[in-house]
Image (cartoon, rainbow, N blue to C red):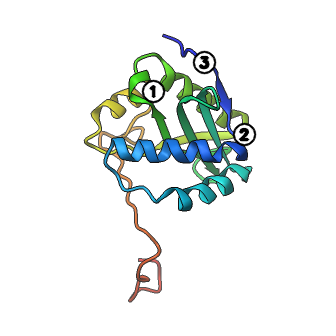
Amino acid sequence: MTPQRPITLATVTDAETLTRLQIEFGTEFDSHEPPFEILLPRFQRLLAEPTAFGLLAGSRTEPTGYAVVTLRPTVYCDGQLAVLDELYVRPDMRGDGIGTALLTAAVHETRRRDGGEMHINVDEIDTDARRFYERHGFVNIEPGTDYRMLCYTRELTGPSLTGSTNGE
């Protein structure tokens, strides 16, 4: 199926809409999201950067979903490395092709911005999201191997690493 409404590139003026959708996303999946007053300036800064973009599905006043992508230089491919930070479709709109349209638009815009590779982090237990991305050609194994790639995270606002001066 195709989405009922178009996919548009978000601007800084859409930061409030993206913030509300992010909070809605977090609420649905019971994940801790910062409050609106913290997220809003983050989205405003992000959307002002040439190394990031947001997409809205549907109208700006009543969006059905959104995606956020950040890009950075890398040695692992020609062009920018893109990270699909978020992709969300409102529950009552799922199954209508909106997620596919958002992902397709994200890949297209990433290529337009000289993207060479896209990474997506998905919770292991989120089998629906994993199936969705795999259906669209994304894999979680390093090409030429038979083992999964893992993503490790660490918040950098806590204590510094100690006892190592050589990066180990």
In what quadrant of the picture does the C terminus appear? bottom left
Q: Which residue is at a point 44% across and 32% down the rendered structure image?
A: 138
Say what amino acid the circle numbered 1 marks. Gly
Rounded to the nearest angstrom, the CA distance separating label 3 from label 2 is 24 Å
Decide: is 95 above or below 133: above
Q: Is residue 85 visible?
A: no
Dots 1, 2 in contact, CB < 8 A: no
Residue 59 to residue 33: above or below: above
Q: Residue at x 40, y 62 (%)?
A: 153
Indicate the position of residue 115 as horizontal and vertical percent values.
65, 40
- For the residue carrying disc 1, how many other residues have a C-alpha within 10 Å: few (<14), some (14-19), or many (20+)? few
Tag 3, which secondary structure? loop
Q: CA distance from mark 1 to mark 2?
A: 20 Å
Residue lying at the far left of the rendered structure = 125
In the image, what residue type sits under mark 2?
Arg
Helix, strand or loop status at disc 2: loop
Q: Which mark is residue 137?
A: 1
| Position above or below: 163 against 44 | below
Q: CA distance from mark 3 to mark 1?
A: 24 Å
Specify the quadrant of the image occupied by residue 25: top left
Which residue is outermost to the bottom?
A: 163
Q: Which residue is mark 2?
A: 113
In-front residue for pair 46/75: 46
Q: How many marks?
A: 3
Badge 3, how many Cα within 10 Å: few under 14, some, many 20+?
A: some
Q: Judge left or right: residue 158 versus residue 53.
A: left
Q: Which residue is mark 3?
A: 5
In this rendering, does residue 9 appear at all? Answer: yes
Answer with the quarter of the image where residue 154 lies. Answer: bottom left
Residue 103 disc label: none
